[in-house]
Amino acid sequence: MGYILGIDVGGTNTRLGLVSEKGELTEFVREATSQYNREGEAVGLFIGIIRRYIEEHATGKEIDAISVGFPSTVDKERRRVIETPNIVGLNNIPVVDTLEREFNVPVFLERDTCLILINDMEKNHIPGEGVAIGIYYGTGIGNAISIDGKIFTGKHGVSAELGHIPMRGVDGRCGCGNSSCAEIVACGRALEGIIKKHFAGSDISKVFVEHGDSEIIKRFVDDLAIPAATEINILDPDYIIIGGGLPNMEGFPREELERHIHRYARKPLPDEDLKFIYSKEGQESGVMGAAIHARKELLKREKGV
């Protein structure tokens, strides 16, 4: 077999890499998403980036499939991107049909956080049986749910929007258009606002080291716990994976976050048996998850499942 071309689309960078059948990553590169973040031109420019990558890094190599993760809502069938808030021109796009027509190989589409969860489950040897959830605190709140080894998508394909559960007492307008969403107070964007208002001039990378004892930062960590505990109380998961840029920042109070989650979790269960795993998320996580996902889907096709 050949390689899977894994692509992880982010608001700032788009990451591409070739992953062998043995799971070895080669030719990993990052391209600025700004190259195709243009209304009316995004699809054509995105295709151009893929084509150039193949010409420069995959000449003479067999590509079995292309697998792409988008920071978007995608349809139930995983063929169309519905909405991409931070990249103009990537709304209501038939990604699978378009890329399969252009490159003549199978194409797989998924939400970016789902691919990161798939990779985290593989790296941490988490079995498919049971429920695993991934909560990724970055610019927003990324979320994915695996039930018995299958990503839970919901009726329309837009499940696991944990950052958009409403929280009473939260004021403001979310990027999704609603008000009172958890992301307004519980994500990296919210932390940037806190620093601007209360710790002007502070380096965000040092905020937990320098201001972790302040009441406003303690409240912020408490706010992070509320959506996590909400999902835990609903799903009673076997494994809770926590990742993203925030929990991996220097001085981030992981024990404090867990203490707040326990405080909000239903007693006595699931509170007494919560299993936390921290994702060592790297630049390549989405690309690797994309490849793992594509290999499994190709195997299903071979078996006629």
Image (spheres, rainbow, N blue to C red):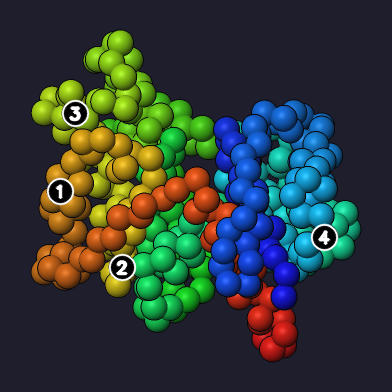
Using the rendered view, name the quadrant where residue 190 is placed: top left
Disc 1 residue type (three-letter): Glu
In the picture as drawn, the residue positioned furthest to the front comes out as: 60
| Residue 84 image point, x, y percent | 63, 41
Using residue 258 as the reference point, say whether residue 293 is left or right of it. right
Q: Nearer the viewer, mark 4 or mark 2?
A: 4
Using the rendered view, name the quadrant where residue 80 is placed: bottom right
Query: Marks 2/1: CA distance?
Result: 17 Å
| Residue placed most toward the observer, 5 or 180 | 5
Q: Name the residue that disc number 2 marks.
A: 239
Q: Nearer the N terminus, badge 4 or badge 2? A: 4
Q: Name the residue that disc number 1 marks.
A: 255
Q: Nearer the viewer, mark 1 or mark 4?
A: 4
Q: Residues within 10 Å of mark 4 (few under 14, many from 20)?
A: few
Q: Is residue 94 visible?
A: no
In the picture as drawn, the residue positioned furthest to the bottom comes out as: 303
Say which element carries label 2. Answer: strand
Q: Are marks 1 and 4 in contact (CB under 8 Å)?
A: no
Q: Are marks 4 and 2 in contact (CB under 8 Å)?
A: no
Using the rendered view, name the quadrant where residue 86 is placed: top right
Q: Name the residue that disc number 3 marks.
A: 209
In the rendered image of this protein, does residue 47 appear above or below residue 266? above
Q: Name the residue that disc number 4 marks.
A: 60
Q: Residue at x 70, y 65 (%)?
A: 3
Query: Marks 1/4: CA distance?
Result: 50 Å
Q: Residues within 10 Å of mark 2 (few under 14, many from 20)?
A: many
Q: Are marks 3 and 1 in contact (CB under 8 Å)?
A: no
Query: Marks 2/3: CA distance?
Result: 28 Å
In the rendered image of this protein, does residue 211 appear above or below residue 95? above
Q: Nearer the N terminus, badge 2 or badge 3? A: 3
Query: Marks 4/2: CA distance?
Result: 41 Å
Disc 2 residue type (three-letter): Tyr
